[in-house]
Structure formats: C-alpha cells, structure tokens
C-alpha cells in the first residue's frame, strides 16, 4: 500500500482531475490512500512547521516506511525510484510519502523519515507536486511491470 500525506487541500479543478486520473491508474497496481492535513497559518515559520508535523504524525504508523520529499533529499531517476518502491515493498507493506507545506517539513518528520528524496532543486507548489509524485508512482509501476509508458 502507498499512502501520501500532504499539507493543504487541492483547490484547482485541473489539479483535482489529474490527481483523480493518476489515482485510477495506480489502483490497478496497489492500494493508494491520500490524506490531506490542513494548512497552518501562524506568525512563526517554526510554529507552522511544528503544527503541521503534529497533524502529519497522526497518520504515520510505526510500520510505515516513510519517504519524505525534501529539497535536501537524494535525487533519483525514474528507474531508481521504481526500484526503491519495489525493494521497499518486499520488506515493508506500507510506503508513506510525505509532502510538506510551503515552508517544508519539521525536523521531527525528517528524523522519522527512512529516506529523503528530492525531485529537483527547483521549488514547486505543493499542490502541483502531488500530481508529479503520483505520475512518478504510476511510472514506477509501469516500469516494474515492463509495460510501455516510460521512455
């Protein structure tokens, strides 16, 4: 099973449609759960990250293999990501990807992470990044099943 924990709700219709499409595609290969926690609006970035961390931690099981999406993480290509997913699911039945909010992830979440991945040194809106992550998970399953899609 793959779980994606995200800070913030998707508001744009076109992003919702893309997410729904990739959820449908991925469902042919594995169970997928997307959990959204609310955006926090405080005066301090430290307080925002701490409160978002508390909300996210409620959905992380001790059995989950946690992959955080961070600028400081390791950059993988699509084949390496597919291998990471495959190898992890042999040992752990649950992979939890975590997408932080506008200010990134709190240190508590980073410490709980089993693996930190970066898609790029570029900064993406976290709503759009959810679509990118879903597309890469779908691509990973296509690669693992030797199905045409990945070029």
Image (cartoon, rainbow, N blue to C red):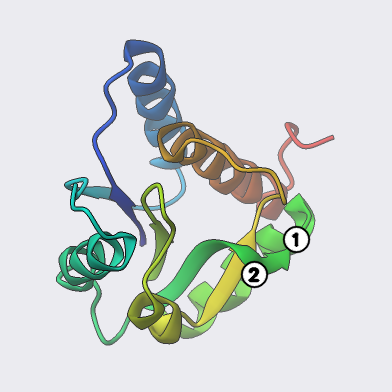
Give the total of numbered labels: 2
The percent coordinates of residue 20 (x first, y second) are 35, 26
The percent coordinates of residue 114 (x first, y second) are 50, 82
Secondary structure under tag 2 reads helix
Question: CA separation, marks 2 and 1?
Answer: 9 Å
Residue 76: image tag: 1
The reply to whether dot 2 and dot 1 touch (C-beta < 8 Å) is yes
Where's the C terminus, which quadrant?
Answer: top right
Q: Is residue 49 left or right of residue 14?
A: left
Where's the N terminus, which quadrant?
Answer: bottom left
Residue sitting at the far front: 43
The percent coordinates of residue 29 (x first, y second) are 46, 48
Q: Is residue 52 left or right of residue 83?
A: left
Residue sitting at the far right: 151
Say which residue appears at 40% left-offset and 13% top-offset: 14
**Which residue is nearer to you in this view: 88 or 29?**
88
Mark 1 or mark 2, which is nearer the start of the sequence? 1
Q: Residues within 10 Å of mark 1 (few under 14, many from 20)?
A: some
Q: Nearer the viewer, mark 2 or mark 1?
A: 1
Which image quadrant is residue 93 in? bottom left
Residue designated by label 2: 84
Q: Residues within 10 Å of mark 2 (few under 14, many from 20)?
A: some
**83 over 150 or under it: above or below:** below
Residue 30: image tag: none
**98 over 125 or under it: above or below:** below
């Amino acid at each position: 099973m793959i779980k994606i924990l995200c800070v913030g709700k998707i508001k744009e219709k076109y992003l919702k449609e893309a997410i729904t499409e990739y959820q449908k595609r991925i469902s042919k290969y594995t169970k997928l759960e997307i959990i959204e926690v609310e955006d926090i609006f405080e005066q301090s970035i430290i307080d925002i990250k701490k409160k978002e961390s508390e909300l996210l931690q409620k959905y992380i099981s001790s059995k989950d293999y946690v992959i955080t999406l961070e600028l400081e993480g390791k950059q993988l290509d699509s084949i390496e990501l597919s291998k990471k997913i495959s190898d992890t699911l042999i040992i752990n039945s649950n992979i939890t990807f975590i997408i932080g909010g506008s200010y990134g992830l709190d240190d508590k979440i980073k410490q709980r992470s089993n693996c930190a991945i970066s898609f790029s040194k570029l900064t993406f809106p976290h709503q759009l990044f959810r679509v990118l992550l879903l597309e890469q998970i779908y691509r990973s399953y296509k690669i693992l099943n030797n199905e045409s899609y990945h070029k």
